[in-house]
Amino acid sequence: MADKLSKYRSKRDASRTPEPVPQTPPEPQGGDAFVIQEHHARSLHWDLRLEHDGVLASWAVPKGLPDDPGANHLAVHTEDHPMEYLTFHGEIPQGEYGGGTMTIWDQGTYELEKWSDREVKVVLHGSRAGGRFALFQTDGKNWMIHRMDPPAHDPLPDLSPMIPTEHARPPRDPTAYAYEFAWGGRRLLVPIEGGRTTAAREHPWLRPLAESFGSRTALLDGELTTLSGAEVLVFYDLLYDDGHSLVNRPYTVRRAALEALNLSTAHWQTAPSWPGQAHPVRQAAKDQGLPGVVAKRLDSPYEPGESTAWLFIPS
C-alpha cells in the first residue's frame, strides 16, 4: 500500500520544524475527527483537515468556511497530514514550508455523507464550525467548498453611511446624546471578511487591520483624516460583528462593541466619545480647529443616508 504521508514527509525536516513528522507509514483506521487551523503564513488562510483512512485529508481555504450557500470559497487540496496534526499548534520557522504561526481555530467530529476523488460531503460538529459542506474539485489542486444548509449568521450588510443633519445648536436634551468630534475627513466603510478587506485596494496599509481580525467578520464605519501630519482612519461605529448585524441595535450597544475591539495603532484608532458633554466637547473641537461636533442619540439605530438622530453642530 502506498505511503500516504510520503509527500508530507518530503516537504519537512523534522530537525527544523516543530510539526509532527512520523517516520512510518500510517495505519488505515476509521475515524471522524476534524480540525481547522488558522495559519498566518505567507498569506492568511485556514486549513481544514478531515480524518480519513489513517491520515488527515487537507484543504487550504483562503477565506475560511463560507457562511452563505450563495458564495463558494476556494479550497486548495494539499498533501495528507498525520493524525498528530489534530492537536498541533505553534510557530513553523520562517523559510520552512508553511512558515508562520498556526493556531487551532476549531475541532470536533464530522458525519460523512460522500467521499470520492472529486467530491466530499460532510456535516461538521464543532464549537465554531457547524453545518453541511461539500468540497468539490474544479481543476488540478483547486477545489471549492460550498455550504449546503442555510446561512448560520446574518449576512454582511451592504450599506451607505449614516449622515448627520446640520443643527445650529446642541439638542435641548443633551443627556440623550453622545458627542464626538467632526473630523472633516472622508467617510469610509470597511468590510472585513476572511482576514481581508476590499478597502485595502485603495488603502493597502489596511491589510494588517483585516488580518488582525482573523476569521471574524465585521463592518466598520469611520473617517479618513489627518492627525499630526499623518493619514489616520478614525473608527466611530461598528455595524456588523462576528456573524451578527448591529444596524438595528442602539448606538450604545454598537459603541460598546466597537470599544471592545481595542482598535488603536498609528494608522487607525477608535474615536473618543463623550455622553452628555455637549459644551466641553464643542469647545475642545473649536480649540483644535475642527469643524464641529456630532451629537448621536444614545438610543438610535444605524440609519443609512441623512438622519436626524445624528446632528452636526458647527464649532
Image (cartoon, rainbow, N blue to C red):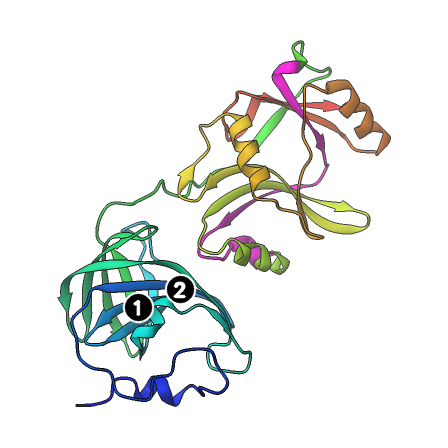
Query: Quick check: 211 left or right of 1?
Result: right
Residue identifier under label 2: 37
Q: Nearer the viewer, residue 265 or 36?
A: 36
Going 33% across and 55% down the picture, which residue do you hit? 66
Does residue 187 belong to the magenta stretch?
yes
Going 67% across and 37% down the picture, which residue do you hit? 271
Does residue 229 belong to the magenta stretch?
no
- Can residue 64 be seen in this snapshot? no
Q: Is residue 161 above or below residue 216?
A: above
x, y (%) of residue 57? 27, 73
Going 22% across and 76% down the picture, which residue do you hit? 54
- The quarter of the picture where residue 177 lies is top right
Label 2 Cα crowd, 10 Å radius (few <14 / some 14-19 / many 20+): many
Q: Are marks 1 and 2 in contact (CB under 8 Å)?
A: yes
- Can residue 23 be seen in this snapshot? yes
Q: Which residues are magenta?
A: 175-202
Quarter holding the C terminus is: top right
x, y (%) of residue 264? 66, 47
Q: Nearer the viewer, residue 97 or 170?
A: 97
Q: Is residue 72 above or below residue 157?
A: below
Q: Amino acid at mark 1?
A: Arg
Query: Quick check: 279 left or right of 9?
Result: right
Mark nearer the N terminus (1 vs 2): 2
Q: Amino acid at mark 2?
A: Gln
x, y (%) of residue 43? 50, 69
Q: Secondary structure at mark 1?
A: strand
Quarter holding the N terminus is: bottom left
Going 53% across and 20% down the picture, which residue do you hit? 299
State how far apart marks 1 and 2 are (Cα).
Answer: 8 Å
Residue identifier under label 1: 49
Q: Is residue 230 above or below residue 92?
A: above
Seen as rendered, the residue at the extreme top is: 172
